[in-house]
């Protein structure tokens, strides 16, 4: 299963839709300390909630990302993670979630990136939760990615193409 899963809030009253979140940040699989650090950062950040704000007269709508305590999730610079979408369109959003990189001395600030798409017309205070995918989940996104390798050019390829 993919590491993160999103769900719509039970009390949502708008028509907002979403795609499942994708973790864009890749760890070096040959560096177990870095991989563990990223895994812990993801685990410590979840669950998070995307809260939709007011809609302007032009259809632009704000959103903020909060943690389980209701505090803003911060990026690596200490700023609250927020942004805007345009209602009625497919909006790709990238959420840069800050954490302390414990693999460097001294420890430094860095971030991992989660991407998802919001669509439709969410209403103010509609929410979309992002959390860890549970054990035994029927999420098959990793299996689908492996199936995609069947037709991918992986031998004799230079510079990714």
Image (spheres, grey):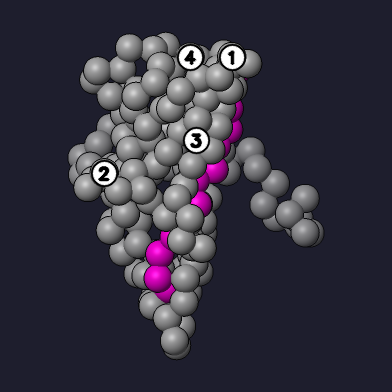
User: Of the residues tagged 1 and 3, which is closer to the observer?
Assistant: 1
Q: Are marks 2 and 3 in contact (CB under 8 Å)?
A: no
Residues under labels 1 and 3: Cα distance? 25 Å
Q: Specify which label sits upstream in the sequence, 2 or 4.
A: 2
Residues under labels 2 and 3: Cα distance? 21 Å
Tell which of 109 and 114 is nearer to you: 109
Which residue is tagged 3?
116
Label ID, residue 57? 1
Q: Main secondary structure of the magenta part?
A: strand
Which residue is tagged 2?
70
Q: Which residues are magenta?
A: 89-101
Which residue is tagged 4?
121
Dot 2 falls on a residue whose secondary structure is loop
Q: Specify which label sits upstream in the sequence, 1 or 2.
A: 1
Query: Which residue is found at the position 47% from the left and 71% from the top?
Result: 109
Residue 132's quadrant in the figure?
top left
Dot 1 falls on a residue whose secondary structure is loop
């Amino acid at each position: 299963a993919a590491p993160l899963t999103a769900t719509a809030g039970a009390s949502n009253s708008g028509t907002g839709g979403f795609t499942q979140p994708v973790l864009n940040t890749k760890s070096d699989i040959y560096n177990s300390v870095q991989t563990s650090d990223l895994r812990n950062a993801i685990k410590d950040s979840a669950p998070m909630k995307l809260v939709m704000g007011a809609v302007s007269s032009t259809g632009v709508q704000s959103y903020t990302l909060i943690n389980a305590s209701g505090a803003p999730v911060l990026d690596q610079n200490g700023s609250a993670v927020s942004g805007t979408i345009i209602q009625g369109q497919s909006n790709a959003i990238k959420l840069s979630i800050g954490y302390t990189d414990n693999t460097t001395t001294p420890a430094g600030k860095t971030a991992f990136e989660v991407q998802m798409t919001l669509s439709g017309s969410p209403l103010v205070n509609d929410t979309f939760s992002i959390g860890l995918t549970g054990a035994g989940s029927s999420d098959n996104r990793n299996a689908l990615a492996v199936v995609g390798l069947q037709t991918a050019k992986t031998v004799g390829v230079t510079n990714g193409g």
